[in-house]
Image: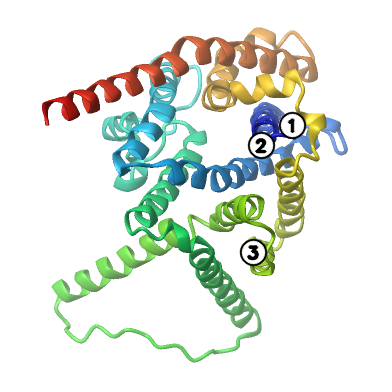
Amino acid sequence: MKDTNRLIEIDALRGIAALAIVFFHYASSYKWADYHLYGYFRYLEEFVQIFFIISGFVILISINRLKRSLDFIIGRLARLYPMYLFSVITTVLITNVMGMATPRTENIYDIIRNCFLVQGFLGGESVNIVYWTLVLEIFFYIIMLTIYKLKAAKYIDIICGVWILIIVLNAVKAQLSIASNIFNIDYPTQIGVVVSPELLMLNISSFASSFKDSIKNNYILLQGRAMLFIAGIMLYQIKMQGGKWYRWVIIALCVTAKVLDYSSDAQIYSSVFFIVFLLLMYLATIGKLEILAIKPFLFLGSISYALYLTHLQIGWLFKSTFDIFPPEIAILIRASLAVVAASLLTSFIEIPGMNLIKSQYKKLMTAKVTSS
């Protein structure tokens, strides 16, 4: 099987994950009886892990093709922003203006920050709950762009090895802290002391601590999801350069970090999902998941971004419309409408917007070369 077909299978996985998130959100708006089939849809939230694993896998494809860092920035902007901006506008209209759903924020500055996708950097609230994954993706892009700028992509195995070791050690430290609280064990720690009693020194110390925690959470731990991206990177390395033992060790450490990182009530099933998704991704990369390379799944993959960004808006607009039907049927109808809407939005907003940005950038670069 050709490499392109393997990527097609990964696109199908992305589409399946997007549809799973749709059903998760739609089903979670109802209360279900014990052991009702739709009650188990709450586990579909875990399919968001696939997005991050795939991002880790494909990022090196983009990095290895780069000629300049601006190409990467514009490429990501063209891919993400047109559909994202449409999603922000429709979210604000439906929640803040039309009042058809409860707004997550009414702060005008939050809304402005959302329009420029900088809420993750400026402490703002996302107007749509699904945007948290985009914020996380941007943090990851910054890390990978920094690696590219430092010309360190050829050392990606070493970088990921050190990275995941730091994450595992942090997770172990957190587990020890939990254990010490439960059993009242005091582990010796070095505590920073504010030597000056002045308020200014206290504020400086507080700011430094907050900044340090922000860097750690957003750029090292990636808000507890770094192991997903790293595992995706390793799967790419295994596909392109072979399954060296240390790459499998790094993946094993990613699983270990996942097990340690989650709270006790969620760690078992979340980690199991992670292992299953890793297996599916690996099978897809070696061409052993041809069953997914069928038109329905490939179609979902082609509209997955628009579907993910707009399904909540479709749900808000049409929730009361289908209340005459049983919830099970209403969810299926709303999901179908979300898929249709995503297909239209992909054709008329996402793709044209992406092509427009790329074409304008190409003209600008051509004019720059000509003038020089």
Q: Which mark is residue 247?
A: 3
- Secondary structure category for the residue under label 2: helix
- Where residue 166 appears, as percent x and y from the top left, is 51, 72
Count neighbours of disc 1 (C-alpha within 10 A) and say few if under 14, some if 14 to 19, many if 20 or more: few
Among all residues in the image, which is located at the extreme left? 371
Up/down of 34 relative to 251, above or below: above
How far apart, in angstroms, are the residues tagged by discs 1 and 2? 44 Å
Name the residue rendered at 42%, 13% in the picture. Answer: 352
- Secondary structure category for the residue under label 1: loop
- Dot 2 or dot 3, earlier in sequence: 2
Q: What residue does disc 2 label?
A: 3
Q: Tell me which corner region of the image, top left, top right, bottom left or bottom right, holds residue 16.
A: top right
Instruction: Name the kind of residue labelled 1 in the image.
Output: Lys
- Where residue 350 appears, as percent x and y from the top left, is 46, 18
- Where residue 107 appears, as percent x and y from the top left, is 31, 33
Q: What residue does disc 1 label?
A: 31
Instruction: Name the kind of residue labelled 2 in the image.
Output: Asp
Name the residue rendered at 78%, 15% in the picture. Answer: 329
User: Which-is-in-front pick, marks 2 and 3?
Assistant: 2
How far apart, in angstroms, are the residues tagged by discs 3 and 1? 43 Å
- Dot 3 or dot 1, earlier in sequence: 1
Count neighbours of disc 3 (C-alpha within 10 A) and say few if under 14, some if 14 to 19, many if 20 or more: many
